[in-house]
Amino acid sequence: TNAGTFKVTATSKDSVISGRTYKVFTNSSASNEYYYKSSGDYFRYNSIKELNNQLVEVLYLKDNLAKGQTWTETKTVNINVGPPLGTVPGTVQFVFTVSEKGIDHIVDGVTFKDVIKITAVPSFSVLVMGTPTSVPSTSDLQYFYSKNVGLIYSKTILTIPAASINASSETKLGAYTIK
């Protein structure tokens, strides 16, 4: 478990990524984060620690979907599968599900209203001599977003034995200021 506090701050800067104009945020304990919203679709572009800190653009929230609805994101990443292949290009497919919508969620004694819970299930594959081959993994990825606040809580556990990935983290919103 990584215990620590970090601060994410919106800047006045924009950055164009994949033809979208992202808002730039600083993170006191990591590199910059980039966020973009178009109607009910929320994108982020940042390093994913569960994927060895590779930069990935992900559609992480669709606030216009009903409970139970899903969407899929497919990304190409480098996966270290060990000898003899080493690091090889791989595909990760995330299936996101709106698990709850419009709920209350308590984080350290503070009740947040109108919360959406998103769960994500990733599956990984790599090309082995031209053939897509599944890479076994286990995961528990949960994200809670409060309307007009953002991410208030997340729990992420991802294990990919062949790639020596065993990541587990929990993030709680401690305080926020909206200006």
Image: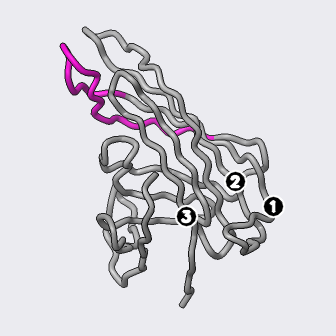
The quarter holding residue 62 reads bottom right
Q: Amino acid at mark 1?
A: Ile
Q: Amino acid at mark 3?
A: Ser
Q: Secondary structure at mark 1?
A: strand
Instruction: Residue type at mark 2: give it.
Output: Lys
Region in magenta: 71-90
Mark 2 or mark 1, earlier in chain: 1
Dot placed on the residue nearer the N-terminal end, 1 or 3: 3
> Which SS class for mark 3?
strand
State which mark lies toward you, 1 or 3: 1
Residue 38 numbered tag: 3
Q: Does the stretch in magenta take in 79?
A: yes
Q: Position of residue 125 (x, y in %)?
A: 40, 22
Measure how far apart labels 2 and 1 are at the Cα level: 8 Å
Q: Residue 103: give its label.
A: 1
- Picture quarter containing residue 134? top left
Q: Which residue is mark 2?
A: 117
User: Given contact means CB atoms under 8 Å apart, are the residues at marks 2 and 1 in contact?
Assistant: yes
Please state which of residues 118 and 162 is positioned toward the viewer in this rendering.
162
- Residue 156 located within the stretch drawn in magenta: no
Question: Please, what is the dominant secondary structure of the magenta stretch?
Answer: strand
